[in-house]
Amino acid sequence: MKAILDKRQALHDPRHFISSGTVLPNPEQPRRIEILKKGAEAAGCKFAEPGDHGMGPIAAIHSPEYLVFLQTIHERWQRIEGASAEVIPNIHPADRSAGYPQSAVGQAGYHQADTACPISKETWNSAYWSAQTAVSGAAEIAGGERAAYALCRPPGHHAFADMAGGFCFLSNSAIAAQFLLGKGLRPAILDVDVHHGNGTQGIFYRRSDVLTVSIHADPARFYPFFWGHGAERGEGDGLGYNLNLPLDRGTGDSAYMQTLETALERVTSFGADVLVVALGLDAHENDPLKGLAITTPGFASIGSAIAACGLPVLLVQEGGYLSDELGLNLESFLTGFGQA
């Protein structure tokens, strides 16, 4: 399988995030890249660098106001007396349709949903090349490849059109899907990360040209809390084009595979001719974020089931955090996918 990776994605090196009121080391570390790369290579992937497709595919999803913020906020933040090394918001608007502040502090609160998306000097550079990696993978699919793996880092599925969150800055899967749509294809997005792809959902929630499906731990007691519930079906033109399949904490392989069957049935009913998979590996039983209980062999079954749908597939890396099994889980998924 063709695979895409840019080394500049490692420059973003977040130090902290706040969880349950405690400042902790940020789990979205650059070392994820080398572990995932080795796992993909063990499954037979051959890596190439992405092309630079420019701002067009990114700006097709994200507002210019937000993109200016991402490119300039760190420099502006450093002018504040006593400012932290990373941009971390400390205030949020009660209503995002209210006024737009001029201050760096106010804009950080407006454009960053939580404390898990700190912005450093190199964040924009890494996020840009993460998005270019996804677009280059999509270009391979549009050019006739049946499958490609985009090793995107930082991840993307919690990023809205104008807001970062949950380790994510640019919505890689959404950018890839929009690029494929522009090539005359009919894309569906299937998100198998342990967390709901709330940013992806928000981007397409009122649209009928891209189907969004997410299998994830029930947000009633799990991040992102406010999105991902089963009743969320889309709005306006998008009503019926969003499917959330929340699972109980600790759900294992058997129940997950039954749910995946439901997800793939919806993809078929949509008439998709290409599938973008937001490939989170954090549903594993030993992932540090502890949401579901998929085994390493279980990922092979997931990969095999997705491949069996018969569509061209772009795999876009999302979550999956440092554990002894991280690389093995990707190898298992890709091996299962390739053997279907």
Image: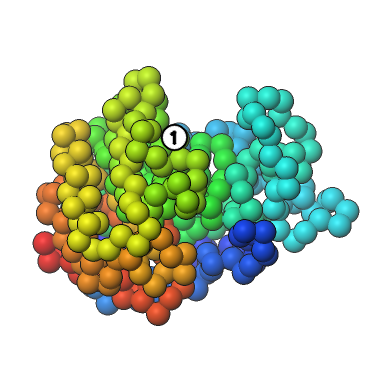
> Which residue occupies 60% across, 44% down?
113
Q: Is residue 286 above or below residue 85?
A: below
> Which residue occupies 43% across, 76% down?
323
Q: In which quadrant is the C terminus drawn?
A: bottom left
Which of the two residues, 313 or 27, is positioned nearer the viewer here?
Answer: 27
Mark 1 surroundings: few (<14), some (14-19) or many (≥20) residues within 10 A = some
Which of the two residues, 338 or 200, is positioned nearer the viewer here?
Answer: 200
- Residue 322 in percent (x, y) is at 46, 73
Q: In which quadrant is the N terminus drawn?
A: bottom left
Give the farthest residue toward the top.
Answer: 236
Is residue 190 in view from this perspective? yes
Is residue 207 in view from this perspective? no
> Which residue occupies 71% across, 25% down?
99
Count the numbered circles shown: 1
Picture quadrant of residue 266 = top left
Picture quadrant of residue 201 = top left
- Residue 6 in percent (x, y) is at 45, 63
> Which residue occupies 29% across, 28% down?
240
- Residue 38 in percent (x, y) is at 35, 76
Q: Is residue 151 above or below residue 100?
A: below
- Residue 311 in percent (x, y) is at 16, 47
Give the farthest residue toward the bottom.
Answer: 324
The residue beneath circle 1 is: 203
Q: Amino acid at mark 1?
A: Ile
Which element is circle 1 on? helix
